[in-house]
Image (tube, rainbow, N blue to C red):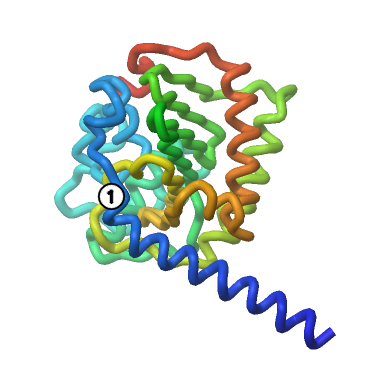
Amino acid sequence: MKLLWILIISIIIMSLARIFLSRKDATSSTVSAEQVYNEAARQIYELLFCDDVHKYEGLKTHFPVLFAPNPSQEDVLSLAQNPGTESRVRILAHRRLKEEGFSAPERAVLGVVVEYNQKGKGLDTLAVFADGSIRYINYTGKMAVVDSPRPTTKIPVLTKQIFEQARQLANAIGPWEERRLPPPAAEQVRITLLVNGDIYFGQAPASVMWKDPLGAPLLQSMTALLVEVTQESAEEATIPAADKQL
């Protein structure tokens, strides 16, 4: 039994080491967004990470607290913790909390983004948020959007599974305190977790990430989700109307 626990701990330590090393090495394994997506796809791609409130000018009318020069902690926290509010709005509210020096009592994973830059093709990006909304950007620039998945599909079950796995991964890595990196380079996989208003991520070559005890299960679930999403929603070549308002 003692030997078994030593083996388990060793696997965990090696896994965490790979995640931390991959984040350090990721800075040299990126490409510019212009290299991977057309203008319409880039606009949607940038909105997935909720790391710049100024990109969401369309929200001013409905959520003025996000743009107020001196918002109260109570008002911003109320928005950030409201489960009935769109997840990306909640993430932006959490970022405002952090910018104003406030803190949230609980840490919540509100979004998961997986990027895979397949050699010879390009970047595929799949994002799922805690409110159930999903955005998929194909390497061609075409998009699939699911805002209210039918309960008869596997999407709700897969989404729940993904966020359970994401919480485990978030417990193993800390937030990235620097500016968000450009998209991953060819043959690289990046898993980004949007935790409150922070970005947590791990990046590695696909061959490495698919063997990682923490990363691989999440990638498997996201792959299964992608199959369901492409069946649920027709691909769109233009910016979805809902995202034009952000």
In the rendered structure, the answer to whether residue 8 lies left or right of residue 74 reads right
Q: What residue is shown at x 43% (from left), y 67% (from top)?
A: 20
User: Percent from the top left, x then y, of residue 138?
Assistant: 43, 24
Q: Nearer the viewer, residue 126 or 104?
A: 126
User: Residue 24 location, x and y as percent?
Assistant: 34, 64
Which residue is tagged 1? 181
The count of marks equals 1
Q: Residue 228: x and y, percent?
A: 64, 25
Amino acid tagged 1 = Leu
Does residue 60 show up?
no
Query: Which quarter shows the C terminus?
Result: top left
* Quadrant of the rendered image containing residue 21: bottom left
> Is there any visible trace of residue 34 in the rendered image?
yes
Badge 1: residue crowd in 10 Å (few <14, some 14–19, many ≥20): some
Establish if 224 lies above or below 78: above
Quick check: 232 above or below 126? Answer: above
Q: Secondary structure at mark 1?
A: loop
